[in-house]
Amino acid sequence: MPVSLSAIRAAQRRIAGGVIVTPCPESIPLSEITGARIVCKLDNFQRTGSFKERGARNALLRLASDRRRRGVVAASAGNHALGLAYHGKLLGVPVTVVMPDYAPLIKIATCERLGARVLIRGRDFAEARAVADQLVAAKGLTYIHGFDDPDIIAGQGTLGLEILRQVPDVDAIVCPIGGGGLIAGVAVAVKSLRPRVKVIGVESAATGNFAAALRAGKPVRVPRRATLADGLATLTVGANAFALARPRVDEVVSVGEDAIALAILRMLELEKTVVEGAAAAPLAAMMAGKLAHLAGRRVALVVCGGNIDPAILSRVIEQGLVHDGRLTRFTAVISDRPGGLAELCRVIAGCGASIKDIAHDRAFSGPDVSAVNAVCTVETRNRAHIASLHRALRKNGFPVR
């Protein structure tokens, strides 16, 4: 079944009241750091923290009554599973989700809390899908594809309709690409109503599904690599999604892991909102200069989800602080006699830096038994502050490396 503007509008009417119309506010700080006039479509505000609810509810409501009674199954790394679990519970449809073993723990736990039956099977999406297909054959469950089912794509397209209504002067929409269902739905909606609006996709350099499909002229399998944007790690773009998106998407760029991590930190600090890696990809592309031609234009960033593992988030924050020069580590050689450490601390404090941790290393400090390596983790303001601190330490007789 082709996905048309009428199908997307029908999906919008169908899911109304069950899925939040999320805000799309202007961001002054993100505009300042990117040079574009940024608005953020905050679909991380959905009840399960992701845009996937749109398609999930639409697909469930489109099921015949006998299929609803038997239940549905899906293979998913998390957000599609969350959307199905939540709306399946609301609509009385039993839901089974098969997750690959790399699925974030927060998404597994939330799915179970929402009442879904969760099976952890397989090293990647393909292996999880094989287990789901077995359940279809054995139990008569209906499989709902997370990014290539036409009803899913139509549901995701409602996000595009909302942006056009909320931001009438939008020039470009920058959207993450994994399996392609979101950008396909958004592109159909946007290009049908306002063809001049640019639709731009952003991939993780560790996935690259859509770019690989463009090179091959068809969806191809891309080996999975570890990425912060786990929601984009689908192995391949969907066939239906690719057919819809290929003629409608104006540009596709990719971003690396460092850029994604920094974008997560910027969203947290500047927008006061928690996002997962996939949702940070559009901002990462803007910050990395991949879309410099959008300077001065009204740009909507699709913030597609906020389900990041807290343990990963803490690591991302620390890495971002290191990138900004706000957290540094160095080794200083100090006297192992009384007063050596106190003098080191005095110099650091005198420079306005804050000590977070100090560890003594005697075993590998060299032949001078009266000296010891002090491994210091220090909070600083920026990279210039780090350089000033190092100069002060050397001036006061503390070799630094």
Image (cartoon, grey):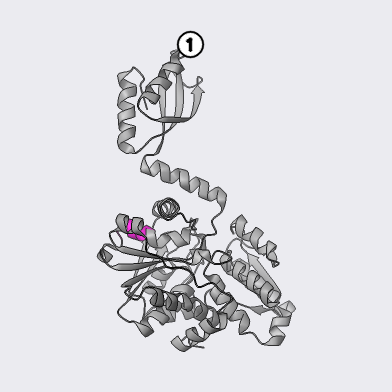
Of the 4 image quadrants, the one containing the C terminus is top left
Relative side of 151 to 97, left or right: left
State the image coordinates of residue 178 (x, y, percent, origin top left).
47, 68
| Tally of numbered discs | 1
Residue 145 shows in the view: no
State the image coordinates of residue 193 (x, y, percent, origin top left).
37, 84
Element marked by disc 1: loop
> Which amino acid type corresponds to the residue marked 1 in the rendered image?
Pro
- Nearer to me, 363 or 392: 392
Q: Which residue is mark 1?
A: 338
Q: Which residues are magenta?
A: 284-290
- Nearer to me, 254 or 128: 254
| Residue 59: quarter of image | bottom right
State the image coordinates of residue 215 (x, y, percent, origin top left).
37, 72
Residue 23 shows in the view: yes
Residue 40 located within the stretch drawn in magenta = no
State the image coordinates of residue 383 (x, y, percent, origin top left).
32, 38
Residue at image position (49%, 76%) is 156
Residue at image position (48%, 85%) is 9
- Give the class, few, some or many, for how many residues have Cα within 10 Å of label 1's Cα (few <14, many ≥20): few
Relative side of 392 to 139, left or right: left
| Residue 144: quarter of image | bottom right
| Residue 251: quarter of image | bottom left
Residue 287 located within the stretch drawn in magenta = yes
Residue at image position (61%, 62%) is 100
